[in-house]
Image: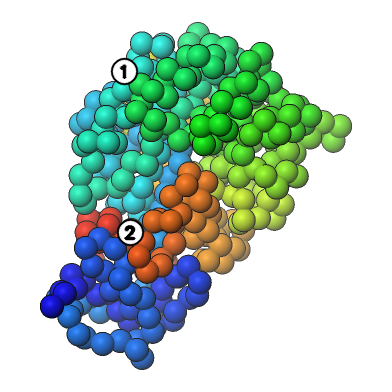
Amino acid sequence: MIRLALVIKDITIYAEDETLQSGFIKIQEGKIQEIGSMKDYSLVNVDHEISLSEDYKMVPGFIDLHIHGVNGSDTMDGTNSSLLNMAATLPKEGTTSFIATTMTQEISLLEKVLKNTGEFIHSHQQKGHAEILGIHLEGPFIHSKMAGAQPIHHIIPPDVNLLTSWLDLSKNTIRLVTSAPELPGGLELVKLLARRGIVSSIGHSIANYNEVLESIQAGATHITHLFNQMRGLHHREPGVVGSAFLQKDLMVELIVDGIHVSPEMVKLSYQQITADRLILITDSIRAKGLSNGEYDLGGQKVFVNNGRALLNEHTLAGSVLSMSDAFKNIIEYTGCSIEEAVQMSSTNPAKQVGVLDRKGTIKEGKDADLVLLNQSNDVMMTFCKGHLVYEAKQ
């Protein structure tokens, strides 16, 4: 007789096709085996039950497509121990999978990181941790005028041959590349990514509206951290921001910490772009989860104080935002529904990087990547492929 590892019941479930006010989820061998209403619940073949109340909400695990580090570790460390630490820590904020993000650095270091991360993804992921879905290559093919916290002296022109070698070096785990398509060779880079099925994102860019349209025609489908380090909205030149508002083929990242983008601009973006195209990200650095102080980012000193990470007085250097706070903030700033917040934090990112068949929604047959929220939308439990990997202290 088949035994079921776990049932979570008497909860509100934000499933793919409906919201169940009093429902249950059966989990077996890391997958969602059954979802239903409590009136249809049967105790048959159940090993263990967790019974709660309708005040608790079950949502799909958050997916962070743009994260550099957390808890003292960074993708650019180029070590298995750092990747393990990130994967072990992130479920505390409800993140059950993520794209490990690099930054502009010297080629030899980038190649070390790409090789190590690719091998880790294929051979060293562990049960009970967030899953690394791939690599986000942020730079070095960006515009020097929009470097932000990216070390300007390591920026290089778009190079199709170099990128091709990096795809091989990473064991084809690069899933997303941020570049400036207006640079010489930029469109050729976008076309290569499109041919290889890799998300091409416009970011750290001074592209004008027509140049963005050309990049969309070449295969670009994504905008990196809207508003930050890109040509802004102007009444005679829409720029990258205006393109994000107008072009329906673009999915758009947004850092919803109230620092990178004001709450009012978050609301405007939500109203114009809608939950159908927005993707919540953290862009967090190794300082996330740690105390105020001085940290390293790509060989640069970063000073963290009261939720703000700065290279100097004016330059933001990533964030210390959690996905759980991004989820709560988008609801607070925009008045969006829980269903829309789920779409922006789980479904859209899963769809964008091609894993919607197994992640991003609560549906029978998908990975049991689940987050239990209380009435205040705080993370109470996180399940990674059916394993309870985090439980908040009551």
Left of 147 or right of it: where is 310? left
Q: Position of residue 344 (x, y in %)?
A: 53, 54
Q: CA distance from mark 1 to mark 2?
A: 31 Å
Task: Kindly give the residue lying farthest to the top in the view shown.
Answer: 153
Q: Amino acid at mark 1?
A: Lys
Alpha-carbon neighbours of circle 2 within 10 Å: few (<14), some, or many (≥20)? many
Residue 191 visible in the shown view: yes
Residue 261 position by quadrant: top right
Q: Amino acid at mark 2?
A: Asp
Q: Earlier in the sequence, mark 1 or mark 2?
A: 1
Q: Position of residue 336 (x, y in %)?
A: 59, 63
Q: Residue at x 60, y 27 (%)?
A: 190
Q: Residue at x 41, y 20 (%)?
A: 166
Task: Kindly give the residue lying farthest to the bottom in the view shown.
Answer: 39
Residue 237 position by quadrant: top right
What secondary structure is found at the residue carrying circle 1?
helix
Residue 315 position by quadrant: top right
Q: Which labelled disc corresponds to residue 265?
A: none
Q: Residue at x 49, y 60 (%)?
A: 342
Q: Residue at x 44, y 79 (%)?
A: 20
Q: Nearer the viewer, residue 196 or 273?
A: 196
Please give the residue where the numbered disc 2 appears in the rendered image.
Answer: 367
For the residues labelled 1 and 2, say whether their Cβ atoms are less than 8 Å apart. no
Residue 303 visible in the shown view: no
Q: Indicate the colouring scheme.
A: rainbow
Q: Nearer the viewer, residue 175 or 393?
A: 175
Alpha-carbon neighbours of circle 1 within 10 Å: few (<14), some, or many (≥20)? some
Please give the residue where the numbered disc 1 appears in the rendered image.
Answer: 112
What secondary structure is found at the residue carrying circle 2?
loop
- Quadrant housing the N terminus: bottom left
Left of 279 or right of it: where is 128? left
